[in-house]
Image: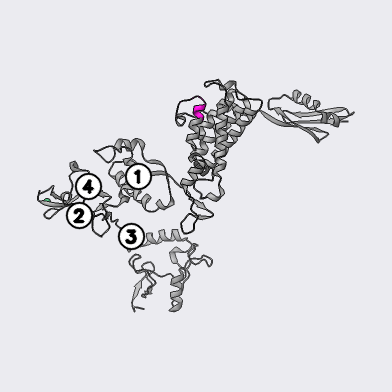
C-alpha cells in the first residue's frame, strides 16, 4: 500500500493505491482500476490483503461475465456495454474525461541488412540529411553482386558496393551515400497484386485506371499462416493508397479462402515423424491429372486432407473411364443435340445446372462427384440401347471434357481432340442448362384395391386420369386382386394414384 488514495471520478469515492507486479507495466499507463469481484487476479489480490470485494455486475458466479449492474448508482440495471457508454457520457458531461481509442500497433521497421530486397530510395547527405531519390531517377536498381559479401554479418552487403553507394546529393551535389539497407519483403507483398496489373510498366507502380478496372482482388486463396502479418500489411497499404486517391477501394481482398493442409496418417508431414509423401513420387506413379483430381475430390478445400485416406489410383481409373467415353463417341462434331436421347440429355443438363454453382462456391469435391455421375450415365448410354452414335452421347462427352479440364487438363485436352476439336478445351464455354429438359418427366403411380396397395409402376407426369385407370386395369396383380368382384367406384388422381372399390 503506497499510503495514497485516488478519487473515483464517477462517484467521488476514495480508493487506496497499491503497487503489485501482476499488473502489466506496458498496458495503458501501467496504473489500473482493480475490480476484485470481476477479475480473478484482482480478486486473489484483494483476498490476500483483505480489501473489500464489491460485486457490481449480477452475472451469476461467472465472475467476468456480463449481466445487469448492481451497487453502481446511475449504472444500475445496465449491461456492461451500455454501462460503458453511460459512464463515458457522465464523465464527458462533467468535463472529467473524454472517450478515446487506443491502437495497440507499433511502428514497423521495414529496413533489412540484406542484398535481396527493394533498395530504399534515400540518399544520405551530410549537409541536407535524408534526401529522396528524385522521381526521374527511380527505380533504384540493385548493383551487381560481383565482389559483394552476401553472407549475413549484421551490416548491409550493399555497403561494399562503393560505386553504387557513392553518389552526388540530388540537392546540393556534394558527395553523399545511398541507403544501404533494403526493404522487408513484406513491403512488396503488401501491394504486388496492384503491380500484377502492369508488370512491365517502367514509369509507374501501377496504372490508376487499371486498378479501377480490375482491382480489388475478388478471391484470395492462401494458407492461414498469411492471416496475421501479410494480410494486415496489405490492408494498411491499400488504405493509404485509397487516402492518396490512387485506388477507389479501401480493402484489397474481397473474399478469403484459407486452404487446408495435406496430412499423412493424421499429422502434418515432417522428416522427424517419417511420414513424408513425396509429391514427385506421386506424380510419377499416378500422373499430375490424377493427383490433382484426388486433391479436389478429397474434401472441401478449407479442410485438411489425409493422404492415407485418398486414392490417386481411383482417380486415374475414373479419368481413363471418362477418356474412353469420349473415344467411343461415333457421331460427328456439330450434330444437333436436340435430336438426342432425352434421358441422357437430362443427365447432362442436370449436371450443367449444378456444376457451375458448386465450383464457384469452392465445393470442388461435390463437383467431382457430379462429374462421376455424369460419366456413369454416359457409359450406360454408350453400352445400352442409346448407343455411341446418339447426339446426346456426344453432348455429354463434350460437357465431361470441359468440366474435367478444371481438374485434369491433360486428360481433358486429349478428350477434346478425340471429339474432333482444336486445342484448347479450357477456352470452350459451358452451354446453359436447358430447363425444359430438367422437368421431371416420369413419376411412380400407386394402385390400391379397397385401400390396399397392390401395384406401383412408372408413368409419364402428363398421363390423363383415364389413361392412368386403363393402365392400372392392365396390371396382372391388380386384376388378380379384383378377382370376381365388381368395381363399384374408382377414385383416381393423375398421375400418381388409383383406388378401386370392389364388392
Ligand atoms: Zn546535400
Query: Along the polypeptide, which appears first: circle 3 or circle 4?
Result: 3
Where disc 1 sits, the SS reads loop
Task: Work out how far the residue at label 3 is from the one at label 1, CA to CA, in angstroms.
Answer: 29 Å
Please say if the residues under marks 3 and 1 sit with CB atoms less than 8 Å apart.
Answer: no
Q: Can residue 405 be seen in this view?
A: no
The one of 421 and 361 positioned closer to us in this rendering: 421
Q: Mark 4 points at which residue?
A: 144
Query: For mark 3, does the 10 Å Cα neighbourhood hold few (<14), some (14 to 19), or many (20 or more) residues?
Result: few
Where disc 3 sits, the SS reads loop
Where disc 2 sits, the SS reads helix
Q: Can residue 105 be seen in this view?
A: yes
Give the mark toward the camera: 3 or 4.
Answer: 4
Q: Mark 1 points at which residue?
A: 250
Query: For mark 2, does the 10 Å Cα neighbourhood hold few (<14), some (14 to 19), or many (20 or more) residues?
Result: many
Image location of residue 356, percent across then percent down = 51, 35
Q: Mark 3 points at which residue?
A: 98
Image location of residue 351, percent across then percent down = 56, 33
Q: Quadrant of residue 14?
A: bottom left
Query: Along the polypeptide, which appears first: circle 4 or circle 2?
Result: 4
Give the mark toward the camera: 2 or 1.
Answer: 2
Start and end of the magenta stretch?
Answer: 415-423
Task: Work out how far the residue at label 4 is from the one at label 1, CA to CA, in angstroms.
Answer: 38 Å
Amino acid at each position: 500500500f503506497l499510503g495514497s488514495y485516488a478519487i473515483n471520478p464517477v462517484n467521488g469515492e476514495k480508493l487506496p493505491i497499491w503497487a503489485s507486479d501482476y499488473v502489466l507495466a506496458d498496458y495503458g499507463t501501467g496504473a489500473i482500476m482493480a475490480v476484485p469481484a470481476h477479475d480473478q487476479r484482482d480478486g486473489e489480490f484483494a483476498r490476500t490483503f483483505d480489501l473489500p470485494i464489491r460485486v457490481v455486475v449480477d452475472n451469476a458466479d461467472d465472475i467476468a461475465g456480463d449481466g445487469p449492474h448492481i451497487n453502481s448508482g446511475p449504472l444500475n440495471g445496465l449491461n456492461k456495454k451500455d454501462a460503458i457508454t453511460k459512464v463515458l457520457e457522465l464523465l464527458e458531461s462533467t468535463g472529467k474525461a473524454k472517450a478515446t481509442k487506443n491502437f495497440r500497433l507499433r511502428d514497423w521497421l521495414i529496413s533489412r541488412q540484406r542484398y535481396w530486397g527493394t533498395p530504399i530510395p534515400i540518399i544520405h547527405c551530410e549537409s541536407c540529411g535524408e534526401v529522396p531519390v528524385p522521381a526521374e531517377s527511380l527505380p533504384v536498381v540493385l548493383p551487381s553482386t560481383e565482389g559483394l559479401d552476401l553472407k549475413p554479418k549484421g551490416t548491409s552487403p550493399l555497403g561494399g558496393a562503393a560505386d553504387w553507394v557513392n553518389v552526388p546529393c540530388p540537392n546540393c551535389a556534394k558527395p553523399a551515400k545511398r541507403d544501404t539497407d533494403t526493404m522487408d519483403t513484406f513491403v512488396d507483398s503488401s501491394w504486388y497484386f496492384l503491380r500484377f496489373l502492369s508488370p512491365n510498366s517502367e514509369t509507374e507502380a501501377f496504372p490508376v485506371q487499371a486498378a479501377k478496372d480490375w482491382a480489388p482482388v475478388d478471391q484470395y486463396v492462401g494458407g492461414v499462416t498469411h492471416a496475421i502479418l501479410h494480410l494486415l500489411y496489405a490492408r494498411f497499404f491499400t488504405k493509404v493508397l485509397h487516402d492518396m486517391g490512387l485506388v477507389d477501394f479501401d480493402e484489397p481482398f474481397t473474399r478469403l479462402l484459407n486452404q487446408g493442409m495435406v496430412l499423412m496418417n493424421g499429422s502434418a508431414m515432417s522428416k522427424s515423424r517419417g511420414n513424408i509423401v513425396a509429391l514427385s513420387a506421386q506424380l510419377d506413379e499416378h500422373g499430375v491429372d490424377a493427383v490433382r483430381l484426388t486433391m479436389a475430390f478429397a474434401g472441401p478445400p478449407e479442410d485438411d486432407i489425409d493422404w492415407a485416406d485418398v486414392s490417386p489410383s481411383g482417380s486415374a481409373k475414373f479419368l481413363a473411364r471418362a477418356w474412353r467415353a469420349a473415344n467411343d463417341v461415333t457421331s460427328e462434331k456439330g450434330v444437333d443435340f436436340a435430336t438426342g436421347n432425352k434421358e441422357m440429355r437430362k443427365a447432362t443438363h442436370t449436371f450443367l445446372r449444378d456444376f457451375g454453382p458448386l465450383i464457384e462456391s469452392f465445393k470442388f469435391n461435390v463437383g467431382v462427384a457430379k462429374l462421376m455421375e455424369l460419366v456413369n450415365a454416359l457409359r450406360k448410354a454408350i453400352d445400352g440401347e442409346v448407343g455411341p452414335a446418339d447426339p446426346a452421347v456426344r453432348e455429354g462427352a463434350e460437357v465431361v471434357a470441359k468440366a474435367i479440364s478444371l481438374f485434369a487438363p491433360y486428360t481433358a485436352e486429349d478428350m477434346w481432340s478425340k471429339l474432333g476439336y482444336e486445342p484448347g478445351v479450357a477456352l470452350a464455354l459451358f452451354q446453359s442448362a436447358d430447363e425444359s429438359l430438367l422437368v421431371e418427366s416420369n413419376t411412380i403411380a400407386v394402385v390400391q384395391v379397397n385401400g390396399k396397395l397392390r401395384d406401383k409402376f412408372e408413368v409419364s407426369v402428363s398421363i390423363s386420369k383415364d389413361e392412368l385407370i386403363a393402365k392400372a386395369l392392365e396390371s396382372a396383380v391388380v386384376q388378380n386382386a379384383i378377382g370376381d368382384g365388381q368395381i363399384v367406384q374408382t377414385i383416381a388422381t393423375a398421375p400418381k394414384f388409383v383406388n378401386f372399390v370392389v364388392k
